[in-house]
Image (cartoon, rainbow, N blue to C red):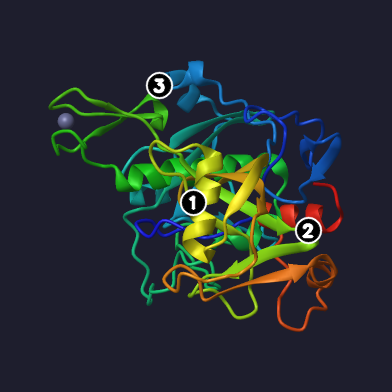
Amino acid sequence: MATSHHLEFPGVGGSRIPACNPPHVAPNVAARVTGVPLQFSHAFQPGGLDRAAHLRGTEPITADPSARAFVFWRGKLLADADNQPLLVALDHPAFVDCREPAVFLGLVPDGPRFAAELSLWHPQEDAATIGQFTDQTHQVHPGFAGGRLVEIRGLMPSLNLLDAECIATGRALLGWHGTHRFCANCGAPSLVEKSGWQRQCPQCATQHFPRTDPVVIMAITRGEKLLLGRGPSWPERMYSLLAGFVEPGETIESAVRRETMEESRIAVGEVRYIASQPWPFPMSLMFGCMGEALDEAITIDPVELADARWVTRTEVQSILAGTHPEINAPRRGAIAGALIEAWAERRI
Ligand SMILES: [Zn+2]
């Protein structure tokens, strides 16, 4: 895992399908792997959002009376008591707390959808843990009665696919704006354009576009055994697949082999791509892969991992059933869990 980024984890990947547009044959079916669908019971699969790029930067789209915004604050989402997103009109008075205009996500059957970030709002509380995936707190903005700002990873199991796609897009896009307010070429403050899909430098005219960072996440196997690891800051009993950022000049397959070697000193032979998942924490795209280990002796990199171990397929089945004595079931909603489950069931 690259040390220059803070990477945290979803989970799973890899097969013989091409790396572009796997056939999304139905909701919750992410990809077909050797003829068998890989089931994803999670958020961030295609949900039907029409991105309508031709409408970006046009006035009529913001004037549409059915336009609504998802509301974000430091990566958290405004949700109701049932953990469903609370959508508000674009002229909501609380949007005085937005530094920049809402970004246009696209069209859904009910109308245009936007995402707004309350970046100027500061609550009266200690915010040290906000944004961590262990964050259990929620915040209440005085402008939104009945709403609270909650960590998105905790909402994922309760979101429908369309809302989840909007939220993944909005969080990643707003996260990019939050950290790219100044021109990377000359340092001048840049301006939002194309309804949030571009920033323009008024001084040197450089255009800047939203980033997506590729990450590999891999189910490394050795016969009937699967490699799991845990990061130093993870909750107790939480294990997942190894993962890491793809580096410049690298293929996905090379990244799988390099990251596995760096973190565990295990050499990997054949690598197969399985499926992908947008992971907007802050703006990654996870490439889920399978890799065949060429040896078994583990030597962890203590900077990246607190532990790594081989678990048998029988053990993985008990992990998924919640009966393993030392390892919890993977979080719902992330590709890691879907890959682990697919391997346990011999679907990949
Ligand atoms: Zn510039």
Q: Is mark 1 within 8 Å of ligand 1?
A: no
**Which quadrant of the picture is home to ligand 1?**
top left
Category of crowding for the residue at label 2, using alpha-carbon neighbours closer than 10 angstroms: few (below 14), some (14–19), many (at least 20): few
The three-letter code of the residue at mark 2 reads Gly
Depth check, mark 3 against mark 2: the one in front is 2
Q: Mark 3 highlights which residue?
A: 57
Residue 155 % position (x, y) = 64, 59
- How far, Cα to Cα, is label 3 from label 2? 53 Å
Q: Give whichever of discs 3 and 2 has the lower sequence position.
A: 3
The three-letter code of the residue at mark 1 reads Arg
Residue 279 % position (x, y) = 55, 48
Which numbered disc covers residue 223? Answer: 2
Residue 342 % position (x, y) = 80, 52
Secondary structure under the numbered disc 1 in the rendered image = helix
Residue 181 % position (x, y) = 26, 42
Q: Give whichever of discs 1 and 2 has the lower sequence position.
A: 2
Q: Are marks 3 and 2 in contact (CB under 8 Å)?
A: no
Which residue does the image show at 49% across and 23% down from the upper left? 61
Q: Mark 1 highlights which residue?
A: 258
From the viewer's side, name the closer residue of 205 and 65: 205
Which numbered disc covers residue 6? Answer: none
From the viewer's side, name the closer residue of 124 and 177: 177
**Quick one: which residue is furthest to the bottom in this view?**
325
The three-letter code of the residue at mark 3 reads Gly
